[in-house]
Amino acid sequence: MPSSPCAPEEVRRVACVGAGVIGGGWVAHFLGRGYDVTAWDPAPDAEEKLRRLVDAAWPALTQIGLADGASPDRLTVAATVEEAVADAQFVQESAPEKLELKRSLLAQLDAAAPPGVVIASSTSGYPMTDMQTEAADPGRLVVGHPFNPPYLIPLVEVVGGERTDAAAVEWASRFYKVAGKSVITMERELPGFIANRLQEALWREALHMVAGGEATVKEIDDSITEGPGLRWAFMGPCLTFALAGGEGGMGHMLDHFGPSLKSPWTRLEAPELDDTLRAAMVDGCDEAAGSRTIAQLVAERDQGVIDVLRATGRLPRQRAEGTDAITHTPSTMGDEK
């Protein structure tokens, strides 16, 4: 991999390829951080949907603090992939999770982007080793895995593939931090990465409980939002369990509760997603949502995330109107604690 054309702190133009829920969320995030963003998506109505997503995200971005010069007007929607990345200083790919599509698109981006520019994939599960096989310069391809919505959830997991240059991983990690993210730079590839594997275990158990008639969708969601989710917002599961051991910490907790690990409480094999289970999940979510529309639920989620981030000290307290906007340096939202 040739040297990157600029340092992470000098990036001003970002290309986002793929503008669905995740790609559009990245667009909103980068716009909120004051970057010029060029986006591309093959859908005929992509631009209309993207600008609608940015408009919906802007109130939340305004609450957490916009960078100097941040504006939706700094978004350009390109007609082709080549146009989107022609003058990009960083590229974020967020295409659907189809391996052959990822391979061909990353190769196309590699051929079109300026030499040395780092290209990151938002993949939620594929190792970069499996995706970089067709690229002429695989050394600059990394994974930058976000969580939805990328404009609010701080986490991004960064990892390279077998043919990725270590300098590209380091550069991407620095760039994401400058861009206001909380970064985990993984030392090795892991299918599904870290957070998704933990989230997937909880999701599979939820599906088993619904499939077996053991709990409703609402009961499952309430069990998290009114229970362990409140602790997980500021303290992860390992440290939380350590406190269950009292003054003896994790050692006492493992000695005391360790035998229960042999109890058949969890079923990590996924249940069969048949028509009955699918209908139960869809109907359960409809019932839980009540009269709230998707747009109303998104606004409720965004406000909830902001409130939690602010309450746990990862965002400044509410600012008085007219105060200075944050600058292009990492915010407390991006600090690793």
Image (tube, helix red, strand yellow):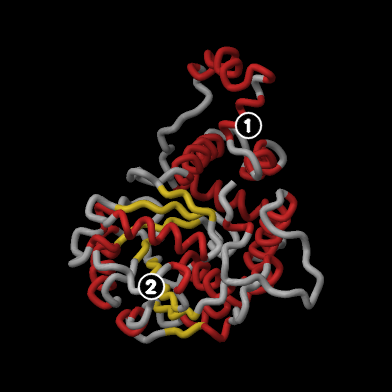
Tag on residue 226? none
**Residue appearing at x 62%, y 58% in the figure:** 333
Q: Can residue 207 be seen in this view?
A: yes
According to the picture, the residue beneath numbered tag 2 turns out to be 6
Element type at mark 2: loop
Q: Where is residue 293 in the image (x, y as percent from the top left)?
A: 66, 65
Element type at mark 1: helix
Mark 2, mark 1: which one is toward the viewer? 2
Specify whether 15 is left or right of 183: left
Q: Position of residue 244 (x, y in %)?
A: 66, 23
| Residue situated in front as seen by the camera: 219 or 179 | 179
Q: In the rendered view, tell whether residue 172 sits above or below residue 7.
A: above
Specify whether 197 is left or right of 82: right
**Residue appearing at x 52%, y 65% in the figure:** 179
Q: How crowded is mark 2: few (under 14 residues within 10 Å), some or many (20 or more)?
A: some
| Residue situated in front as seen by the camera: 235 or 103 | 235
Q: Can residue 53 be seen in this view?
A: no
Q: In the rendered view, tell whether residue 304 sits above or below residue 41.
A: above
**Residue appearing at x 47%, y 77% in the figure:** 12
| Residue situated in front as seen by the camera: 162 or 8 | 8
According to the picture, the residue beneath numbered tag 1 turns out to be 240
Amino acid found under the numbered disc labelled 2: Cys
